[in-house]
Image (cartoon, rainbow, N blue to C red):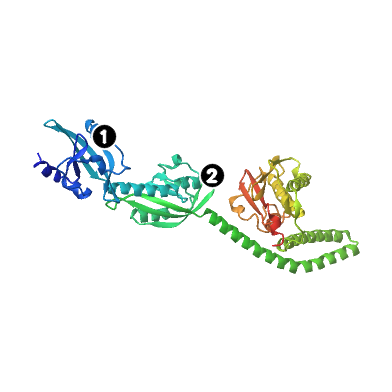
Amino acid sequence: MKSVEPRIIDIIPDMCFVVSEDLNVVDCNRQARTVTGLPALRNGVLPFSSLFTPESPRFSLADLAAEAGAREVEAQFRIGKDRVLDARLVVRSLKENGTLRYYVIARDISEEKQRELDLLRFSNVVHYTVNPIQITDSAGRMIYVNPAFERVTGYGEQELIGKNPNVISSKKYSREFWLKVWSVISAGKVWTGEVENRRKDGAPIYTHLLISPILDGDGKVIGYLGAHRDLTEQKALEQQLMHSQKMESIGTLAAGIAHEVGNPLTSISSIVQVLSRTTTDEFSREKLGLVQAQVHRITKIIRDLVDFSRPSNYQLQPTDVVKSLTDAVEIVKMGKKAKEITFVTHVRQQIPLLYLIPDQIAQVFINILLNAVDALKGRRGTIVTEFLCDDRDVHVTITDDGCGISTEQMGKVFEPFFTTKPVGEGTGLGLWVSYGIMKSFRGDITVRSTEGKGTSFTVILPLNAKEYQNV
């Protein structure tokens, strides 16, 4: 037996050990000696368990050998002082001449374990990254989305798996656009670009998208990885900056127009007043009265332009915004158009005093409320105001269930002279002036609207506005 066994087990590429019934190593093959550094063993004096690291799983050779199936177990061999070898063991037992021997074959799986570890690390990076990630099969059906993708899109995993990524499409790109993308990635190349998609609630999502093909060992495309970098907040900030710059330019222009128009308008008004006092002709007096009314209208427009473009000289003072809004509601309720409208105010928490200019914040509230009344077009409806306060701001939301604002008009609501009202019923300066007032308070106004269902304006007032008084 001694002369045969080494020849048999030495040709096996895996490590082989012959272990006695008392669990000492009796013999091993050439591969085992090469890997572990063991000498050729003639006497069973080395415990088999001494070959393993302290962290290696414990197992019973007798139990493994007794099982009918070929159950495998993993273990860690000590290789020198610092190295560890991961192996998968198969155990068989055999009695010869009444002596029990265990035959252990140990296959080196260190590379396999390293690949598993690398895959685990990669999967954790993909799963927990803040960037939305999606993986599709070769046909383009999603087979994986990470939590960031769910959070950004508003869809749950079960709503996305098995679906085409166009479930979040904004429908703004042509079929030819996506055919070009598909031709690039199906050829095994990477495609990058900025895209606009839609959340489940319809809100836009702007991302920088990288689509990378996933290749198998033969270079065949078996799937695609889509990595998004969310640009939505960046786009919003860019739009706010552009809007602020545009409003600043308009304010400068408005100041020049007010100066150039104001002086001749004053002269016209004076001449009209003189003529009205000197003429006795009723027809002339009537027409001069119409001229004077239009002069007053133009004067009000110019005053609004000047108020927007010129910093306020008023001093900030502690202001009860709840009372300011309540007073504004009472003023608006007196109008004829508001007779059929129900006004509701919700104050769900204590709202602190804010450092504002009372007259100006009242003007903001009145302008928004008047727009809400006009949106109801004289029919029955409800205007709801609500206060919310967080660590930084007070949010005052005014919501109507009126006609709403179209998508095309949403981007113009704060521009000067933009109005949806008939000629003569609105100057288009109310929201523009309100926007300027809010910026002077270091606050903001936002708007949400669904055409045919209603509109919500939110006035955002900072709690620390006093810090900006002398800025």
Q: Nearer the viewer, residue 46 or 204?
A: 46
Q: Quadrant of residue 64?
A: top left
- Give the x, y percent position of residue 28: 17, 43
Q: Quadrant of the N terminus?
A: top left
- The residue shown at (75%, 52%) is 318
Classify 354 as above or below 92.
below
Report the disc number at residue 377.
none
Q: Quadrant of the C terminus?
A: bottom right
- Give the x, y percent position of residue 226: 41, 51
What is the secondary structure assignment of the residue under circle 2? loop
Q: Inspect this view and state whether residue 442 appears.
A: yes
Query: Nearer the N terminus, badge 1 or badge 2?
Result: 1
Residue at mark 1 to residue at mark 2: CA–CA distance: 58 Å
Q: Quadrant of residue 431?
A: bottom right
Q: Nearer the viewer, residue 35 or 205?
A: 35
- Label 2 sits on what residue type? Asp
Left or right: where does residue 412 sit relative to residue 159? right
Q: Inspect this view and state whether residue 437 appears.
A: no
- Label 1 sits on what residue type? Ser
Left or right: where does residue 93 sit relative to residue 259? left
- Give the x, y percent position of residue 51: 25, 43
- The residue shown at (41%, 53%) is 178
- Give the x, y percent position of residue 280: 91, 61
Label 1: how many residues lie within 10 Å, few (<14), some (14-19) or many (20+)? few
Residue on which the image places disc 2: 201
Report the disc number at residue 60.
1
What is the secondary structure assignment of the residue under circle 1? loop
Which of label 1 and label 2 is nearer to you? 1
